Image (cartoon, rainbow, N blue to C red):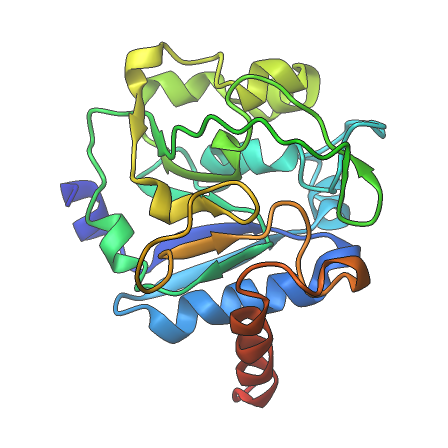
Amino acid sequence: MSEQVAELAPFRIYVGWDPSEASAYDVCRHSIKARASVPVEIHPLKLDELRVRGLYSRTGDPLAATEFTYSRFLTPHLAGYEGWALFCDCDFLWLTDIAELIALIDDRYAVMCVHLDHRPKEDSKMEGAVQTRYPRKNWSSMVLYNCGHPANRALTAEVVNRETGAFLHRFQWLEDDLIGSVPETWNWLEGWSDKPKTGHPNVIHYTRGGPWFENWREVDYADLWLTELEACKNAPA
């Protein structure tokens, strides 16, 4: 594990938040905290709050499926460009202790993520959002950021508000050798990734849509998400 991480407590996690997926955020947050053997600090990326703080000024994008399409890239800025932090979409279900992912951190890299080759067949997702296709699709949906890495100093709030989706989601502020890899089980795409022969992935990403949407109640591992939802509802405030 990185010495930077070992010195930091709690570990900072930023999760995308969208009003249409509030329950997904709640379940994601609960699934992390319920299994974490290390202290964690989880922050929702709420667009209205980021605007009030003067950190987000982009106008609407018809291709943006969620409110956190771009705000995710504020993670190093929000973390003060110090230490490591994690971003993930809200449609994640964490089934494994996040400490196991943190143990994979390598200070040589500016970011670490699953190097997916995701080429979705669907033309729409969630509640009718356009399903886009582009290189490195879904790499940015779960990222370990080495916030103190000099290369991430380029990812200022001004850059996040100005640059194209292609520049940001393809990590074009970085040289390729600064993009580290972690196993696919840490961003297992429902409807795309191969199911494990036994057990379940470490982290399920309901990228097409999850059981909180009426049209996506029958996806793989929907039962695990619904079980987590009940546990979340019954958890102490």
The image position of residue 217, as x and y in percent, is 71, 65
Residue shown at the point (29%, 37%) measured from the top left:
182
Residue shown at the point (60%, 75%) measured from the top left:
226
Residue shown at the point (39%, 28%) measured from the top left:
115
Residue shown at the point (25%, 58%) measured from the top left:
99
Q: Is residue 124 left or right of residue 14?
A: right
Q: Is residue 158 left or right of residue 192?
A: right
On screen, 209 above or below 83? below
The furthest residue to the front: 197
Q: Nearer the viewer, residue 39 or 205?
A: 205
Q: Is residue 149 left or right of residue 163?
A: left
Which quadrant is home to the C terminus? bottom right
Q: How many marks?
A: 0
The image position of residue 200, as x and y in percent, is 37, 61
On screen, 126 above or below 149? below
Q: Nearer the viewer, residue 197 or 183?
A: 197
Which quadrant is home to the N terminus? top left
The image position of residue 143, as x and y in percent, is 43, 38
